[in-house]
């Protein structure tokens, strides 16, 4: 319990920072919703004509920004990026904070198994990820009601929230595994960030192609395609894949951590 | 001199990767995406023609800009900026927090060289690496530009915007490295700085209707599109950028030369 409490406490400040970021993103984003052209000008008619690759870059492929739900889908895309980045940082911090601080002897000579220590740290991180994702569900709903939009988007918010939660947990496990495998603390963080950049680029590629096929397996950010979520469907097979990969990488990371050569670097 | 050599050598490989990546991004934008983008222009022109007259005139000009080679270069530049901001910050953090991270500040501070010189040499090394990286970037940009058979003298300046933007984030990185009590992860710190700047830019594109100034969004200070539209970035933003760089570096210099050398 001590470990969980301590972890939560040290992570409080970054949590506040990320929450502020998510808040700005969601609230400010929602105020930008125009609805169907004011003054007889339909700007969406223009974005409809933009080639897919441009829309993919700004997260607007497959989203009809004339409707509030479609507009929200664009914000949800950026929110998913934000949630995933936060999860990545929690992942490598949980594994390598003490190694980076060169204080690992203090923690790992305590009469607790390594596995238990890491599990407690990961547990604390999962709590934070869950909280952060809940905010990702609360903010858009609050923004929609505060701005007085009449259209109901609670179903979309719930679906995008669930998708972002699953994906961020996957990124979290990947980041944990990479940090366990890395020799130096910095290496783990760098590789985790690289995996994310790769996933982002693959996401843009997937959006550019209308039928990405197997490529979609390589881009967790697009496991739950915008068009599917907007039609009210959370792909069960991809959800299963996501959970499976998360549990498998997490379990593997904990096993490998027991045999990791802890060095202060 | 050995500090300079050491720091440059330690950064050169990472910098080469960052440089190749930013050159690749802008090439993909200009050689891969722009031609596709241009194809859709005639249809969009038709739509704009259907808009109310005053609106169509103003908006049409904006669209003309976006669809011109220069304008699209500006659009693509923004993505390079976000990426370059992270690169510059990570360069600065890794060089300036090296001893702090390795807990060996006493090692470097007991050498027969003043702290000012250490600071100056470290700064020189990161600026040199950044400049070298940008020479490649500008060369690639100019090459693509000349392929398109266009000639606008301002394009050279537009290609240099990455360097100006990166200088700001370099200074911010130095500030972070010197003032943070612990620097656990270089890439983590750099990613946070870049992501924060990205959010501020997003904020500014939304607030621009109510509040046209964007002093809080450094990624937009050197906007190539502004340069092509107005002929300048706007003196106040250039001044702001200089102020950011000067104050970050001055504050860091003060702290670096005066602080206690804690090794723990």
Image (tube, rainbow, N blue to C red):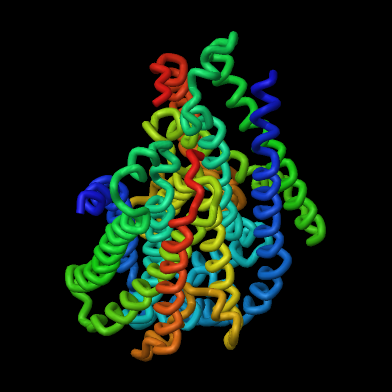
Q: Position of residue B44 (x, y in %)?
A: 57, 78
Determine whether A125 is above or below A221 in the image: above
Which image quarter: residue A151?
bottom left
Q: Determine the residue located farthest toward the front in the rendered image.
A: A111
Q: Which residue is drawn at 31% across and 48% down?
A: A14
Farthest residue in the top direction?
B112
Whether residue A215 is situated above or below residue B193 in the rendered picture: below
Point out residue B224 in the picture as x, y percentages from the top left corner: 59, 50
Going 50% across and 79% down the picture, which residue do you hit? A61
Return the x and y of residue B71 as percentages of the image width and height: 62, 59
- In this rendering, is residue A65 above or below A21? below
Check the picture and name the quadrant holding the N terminus of chain A: bottom left
Q: Using the image as rendered, state which of residue A241 and residue B52 is in the foreground.
A: A241
Across the whole image, how many numbered discs are drawn on residues? Answer: 0
Viewer-proximal residue among A243 and B21 = A243
- The answer to whether residue A232 is above or below residue A1 is below
The residue lying toward the viewer, choosing from A165 and B70, is: A165
Report whether A17 appears left or right of B122. left
Residue A23 in view, yes or no: no
For residue B244, what is the image quadrant? Answer: top left
**Left or right: B222, with A129 as reference point:** right
Q: Residue at x 70, y 46 (%)?
A: B16
Would you say B124 lies left or right of B240 here? right
Could you tell me if residue A145 is visible in this image? yes
Could you say where residue B17 lies in the image, as x and y percent from the top left?
A: 68, 50
Q: At 54% across and 36% down in the image, what residue appears? A: B94
């Amino acid at each position: 319990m001590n470990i969980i409490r301590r972890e939560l406490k040290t992570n409080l400040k970054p949590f506040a920072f990320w929450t502020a970021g998510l808040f700005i993103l969601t609230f400010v984003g929602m105020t930008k919703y125009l609805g169907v052209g004011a003054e007889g000008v339909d700007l969406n008619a223009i974005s409809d004509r933009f080639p897919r690759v441009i829309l993919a870059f700004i997260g607007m492929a497959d989203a009809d920004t004339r409707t509030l739900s479609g507009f929200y889908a664009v914000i949800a895309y950026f929110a998913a990026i934000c949630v995933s980045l936060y999860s990545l940082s929690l992942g490598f911090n949980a594994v390598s904070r003490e190694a980076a601080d060169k204080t690992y002897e203090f923690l790992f000579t305590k009469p607790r198994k390594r596995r238990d220590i890491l599990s407690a740290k990961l547990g604390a991180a999962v709590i934070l990820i869950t909280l952060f994702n809940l905010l990702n569900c609360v903010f858009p709903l609050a923004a929609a009601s505060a701005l007085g939009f009449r259209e109901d988007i609670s179903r979309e918010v719930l679906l995008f929230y669930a998708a972002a939660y699953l994906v961020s947990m996957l990124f979290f496990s990947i980041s944990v595994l990479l940090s366990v495998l890395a020799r130096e603390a910095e290496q783990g963080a760098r590789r985790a960030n690289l995996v994310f950049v790769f996933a982002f680029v693959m996401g843009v590629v997937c959006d550019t192609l209308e039928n990405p096929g197997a490529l979609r397996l390589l881009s967790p950010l697009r496991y739950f395609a915008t068009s599917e979520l907007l039609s009210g469907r959370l792909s069960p097979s991809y959800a299963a894949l996501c959970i499976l990969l998360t549990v498998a990488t997490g379990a593997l990371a904990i096993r490998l951590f027991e045999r990791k050569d802890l060095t202060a670097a | 001199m050995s500090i300079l050599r050491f720091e440059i050598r330690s950064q050169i490989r990472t910098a080469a990767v960052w440089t190749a990546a930013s050159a690749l991004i802008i090439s993909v934008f200009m050689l891969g995406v722009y031609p596709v983008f241009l194809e859709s222009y005639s249809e969009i022109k038709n739509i704009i023609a259907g808009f109310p007259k005053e609106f169509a005139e103003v908006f049409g000009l904006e669209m003309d800009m976006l669809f011109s080679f220069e304008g699209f270069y500006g659009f693509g530049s923004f993505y390079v900026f976000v990426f370059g901001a992270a690169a510059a910050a990570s360069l600065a953090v890794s060089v300036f927090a090296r001893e702090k991270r390795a807990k060996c500040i006493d090692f470097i501070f007991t050498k027969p060289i003043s702290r000012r010189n250490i600071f100056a040499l470290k700064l020189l090394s990161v600026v040199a690496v950044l400049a070298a990286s940008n020479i490649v970037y500008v060369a690639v940009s100019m090459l693509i530009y000349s392929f398109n058979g266009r000639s606008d003298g301002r394009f050279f300046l537009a290609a240099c915007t990455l360097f100006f933007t990166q200088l700001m984030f370099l200074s911010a990185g130095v500030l972070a490295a010197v003032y943070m009590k612990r620097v656990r992860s270089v890439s983590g710190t750099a990613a946070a700085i870049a992501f924060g700047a990205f959010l501020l830019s997003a904020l500014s594109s939304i607030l621009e209707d109510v509040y046209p100034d964007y002093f809080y969004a450094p990624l937009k200070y050197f906007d190539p599109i502004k340069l092509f539209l107005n002929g300048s970035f706007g003196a106040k933003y250039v001044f702001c950028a200089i102020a950011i760089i000067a104050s970050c570096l001055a504050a860091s210099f003060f702290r670096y030369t005066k602080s206690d050398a804690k090794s723990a």
